[in-house]
Structures are given as C-alpha cells and as structure tokens.
Image (cartoon, rainbow, N blue to C red):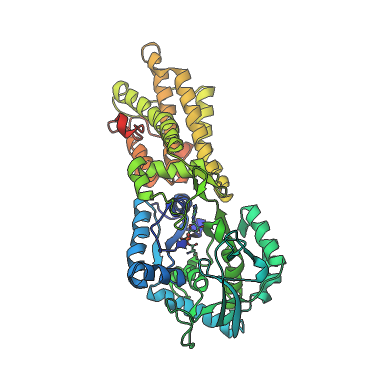
Amino acid sequence: MTAQNPAKGRFSLTTAISYPNGAPHIGHAYEVIATDAIARYKRLDGYDVLFTTGTDEHGLKIQQTAARLETTPRALVDEMSQKFRLMAEALNCSHDRFIRTTEPDHYAAAQAIWQRMQDNGDIYLSKYIGWYSVRDEAWYGEDETEIGPDGTRRAKATQTPVEWTEEENYLFRLSAYGEKLLALYEAEPDFIGPETRRNEVASFVRQGLKDLSVSRTTFDWGVPVPDAPGHVMYVWVDALTNYLTVCGFPNESDPRWRHWPIDLHVIGKDIVRFHAVYWPAFLMSAGLPLPKRVFGHGFLLSKGEKMSKSLGNVVDPMDLITTYGVDQLRYFVLREVPFGGDGNYSHEAIIGRINADLANDLGNLAQRSLSMIAKNCDGAVPVPGPLTEADRALLSAADALPGQARAALEALALHTVLAEIWAVVGSANRYFAGEEPWRLRKTDPERMNTVLYVTIETLRAVGILVQPVVPTAGAALLDLLAVSPEARTLGHVGEAHRLVPGTALPAPAPIFPRFVEPEAA
Ligand code: ME8
C-alpha cells in the first residue's frame, strides 16, 4: 500500500484461524476487519507488516461435521475454507497469507515444533482418563464439570457436553510452566489484553496447571505425530503452530522468519487461555521467542444474543456487505464496539452510523466544500490568505491526528482512533457552518478561499487517517483532493505536505451515499 520505511521496523499480526465447519459469521468478519485496520495503520506508518489469517481445518469437530453431511473432511474443508477466504477478500482485507492448516508447509511446521518439545523432554506417553468435551476438544477435571438441567454432565466453563473417555495420549508437561508463565505475565504486562483477560488467565494459572493431552488416537483427521503411528496431534497444537508456519518455520533462514516473534495475536475472548497459556508454554518448551501481545476482543451480539454456528442465529457477513457496503460495515463495527468489549449489531444502529457519521458529517462536508471549489475556484485548490485563530485551531487539530492515532492504536483502542478523527470532522463542520463561505463568495472572496482551503486541507488529513478503516472511500476522498498515491501515509499529514494552491481537482463526486431503506428507494 505504501512505501516501507526501514527505520520503523517490522510489525507482524494475526487473527485466530477459524474452524471451517460452518459458514463464516459476523464474529469472524469482525475479527478480520479489526486486524486488517491495525495492519493497514501500521503500513501507513511505514512498518514492514506481516498480516495473516486463515482456517483451522483438523480435529474431531470437522471430522464429525463431515460425517453428518455425508462428505469427507477434506471435501468439507476445501469447500468451507473457500467461504472464509472469499469473505476476507470481500471485506477488503489486506492479509499477506490466508493459511490453511491442511497445507504441506504447515504439517512440516507442526511436526517440527512437536519434535522440539519432545527433544526438550516435555512430551511423554500416558493413559488419559477423564471427562472429554468433543465440542471444546478438551479434557476436564471432575470439578470442572457439573450436571446440567437435562441431567447430562457438561463442562462448567463452556456448558458443552462431556463424555467419560479413556485414551492413550501423549501429554505435554504443562505443569512445569506455571511459574514461568506467571513470571511472563508479571514482566510483560501487555502480553495479555485487555486487563480483565489478563487477570482471568493469571488466576487460572495460579490455581495450578495439569499436564495437557496433546495427541488423539480415536480419529485420524489431524497432523500425524512424528514416529507415533495412530496418533494425530491435538488440534490446538496444530492450530497455534500456524503462526510459525506463516513465518517460514522451521526454516529460520526463510526471509519471512524476520517477522517472528509475532507482535500481536488478535483473537476472541473465548480462546485467550489457549493463546496466553498453552501457546507460550509450547514456545518456551521449543526454545522459541514468545509473541509480544495477545488481545482478546469481545463478541458481537445480535440484539444482545451471541451469534454462533451451534446456536443457528448466524448473520451472513456477505449479506451485510451487499446491504450496507464494505466500508460502511467496517466503519460500523470498529466505531460502535469499544475494542475489547462486547458489542451489539442491529439494522437501526448501522444505518444510524452510516447516515450520521459517514453520509452527513464526512460525505456532506466533502461534497459541499468541493462543489463550492468546482464552481467558484476554477476547480483548483484555492489560494489561502492570512490565517485566523479559527483556521489555525482546525488545522492543528487535524495535524495532531497521526500522533493521537498512534497512541490509541498502541492501546488497541480502534474506537478511540475513530472517535478522534470524527471529533475533527465535527469541528470542521462547525467551522464551515460558522464561517459561511457561501456568503463570503460575494462579500469577501479571498476569505472564502481561505475557508475552503482550510476545510479541504482538514479533509486531506481525515482522508489519510480513515484509509485503514474505510479503504475505498478514503482513497476516493484523497483522489478528489488530487493527493498522489505516494503522499497518503501518516507522515504526510501536517504542515510540510499541505495541499498546493492551484492544483487542479477532479469533478466532485459523493463518497458516502445515504442509506435508504429498500422499500423507500
Ligand atoms: O476458535 N463475535 O475458531 P472459531 C466475535 N479455530 N468474535 C467471535 C464470535 C463472535 N460472535 N464468535 C467467534 C476457533 N469469534 C479456533 C481458533 S486459533 C489458533 C484457533 C471469534 O471459528 C473467536 O473468538 O470458533 C475466534 O477468535 C475466531 O472468531 C474464530 O473462531
């Protein structure tokens, strides 16, 4: 998207990889949108970025879904993975790789990390007996289960059914890593976010960790354990390793290896434990550097209810894209939901945001100011006169945006980045209304030129800043301002790169149409 600035260094980030045992839902879309926006901000700020997403294709859940649908696991994942890939593309995600865990280089990576953990003495063969949840693919202690209202036993934490199961398994010596993990959380307070998740994970680890079953013999849809016929890897060992695969592991001379360790794993709050307990323990065992940060975002709820494949109340993101538009959907989920908290989706809420923030506040301001320039300034960037206090205040608010965005992004507060940009859009609207350039046209054309100049220079900063969230509209706005493609980075906001008076501008065109209900259209 933009030229890299080697001085900035590299930044690598991932989403979780989704189970393709059903079609993608808005929760999956939310996660890739948010991660994509962060990736785009980092690129815009000159970082050498690696951003990956993909599908987690092994395990009993997939095998069982395939059986139910009377197909093979391979055919199921080939079909379903494609839907996730197409969704990411339709959402305009800028990922560098869409990884599938059934790809050969991933098998090699998973077997290599296994070998390292085994060589380190952390994997041993044992008989595992206990309560097993197929849905969670996890074992539970008796005290972690309860009898539900229907008389069947279930896992307390996830409310999924458990069965008494006996299996010869390889175990990972997770119990040996409790102290090291607690020391990690202490030394790196940002390792787990948001803070509530960190506290949950730390208290889970403080209660003591049991060794973890890491192989299965009751089904075969998985990565084979090296030198252990009949054993496939526990799906989470395999799945988490995707983050190494995308960096070229185990080939440490692969150019992609520069992206290891990953700077940020963006995942949902339900899988923080896997990423903040198991994953660093596996990596410590394998002698590999640890990711810098694991962030558990909240859930998107449809009018207060969780959406999930098993509950069957799934909103198809492709339908949302068709109904509202990609940029509009991206803006809505990032603006509406404080990143890290849960959020609600409703038709009313999304059209509210589209019409108020996008069409009215930003779209109209661009349309009005650029139309005035087209009519009254020969369609070129006007020549500003001396600046007033009000002009300077607006320009300096716009100039401050990259710094504010960097700080908010450091805290992963995507909603704050947008709130700050829209605060400037709000100020620009008040400025424009207060200065009344349409009146100045007759009384003081020179002042009109200044007001229009200050307005579109503010829009230039806004256009640059919104690109990661609304890439198409951001680019369209910058096109209308004749900003060259190389001059659209965060570094181009501010005094040194102001719009050049006299530059010819293209004919203005709307960037954000209002949403009109189909029956009213
Ligand atoms: O957990 N709102 O896959 P998955 C927001 N394969 N996010 C949601 C959500 C919702 N309603 N529902 C799910 C898996 N997610 C594993 C991950 S990573 C090595 C393996 C999020 O398809 C969920 O929290 O169930 C997770 O981050 C992602 O979507 C994929 O969920």
Q: From the viewer's perspective, is 336 left or right of 368? A: right
Q: From the viewer's perspective, is 136 left or right of 384? A: right
| Residue 166 in the image, given as x and y percentages of width and height | 57, 80
| Residue 439 in the image, given as x and y percentages of width and height | 39, 13
Q: Residue drawn 33% across and 62% down?
A: 82
Residue 101 seen in the figure: no
Q: Residue drawn 38% across and 68% down?
A: 68
The single residue placed furthest to the front in the displayed view is 151
Asked whether 397 or 268 is in front, the reply is 268
Q: With respect to residue 102, does 358 lie above or below?
A: above
Asked whether 335 or 25 is in front, the reply is 25
The C terminus sits in image quarter? top left
Q: Residue drawn 38% across and 55% down?
A: 88
Residue 433, quarter of the rendered image:
top left
Q: With respect to residue 295, does 121 lie above or below?
A: below
The single residue placed furthest to the top in the displayed view is 443
Asked whether 133 or 449 is in front, the reply is 133
How many badges with numbers are in the image? Answer: 0
| Residue 406 in the image, given as x and y percentages of width and height | 54, 47
Q: With respect to residue 401, does 433 lie above or below?
A: above
Asked whether 275 or 23 is in front, the reply is 23
| Residue 155 in the image, given as x and y percentages of width and height | 60, 64
Residue 494 seen in the figure: yes
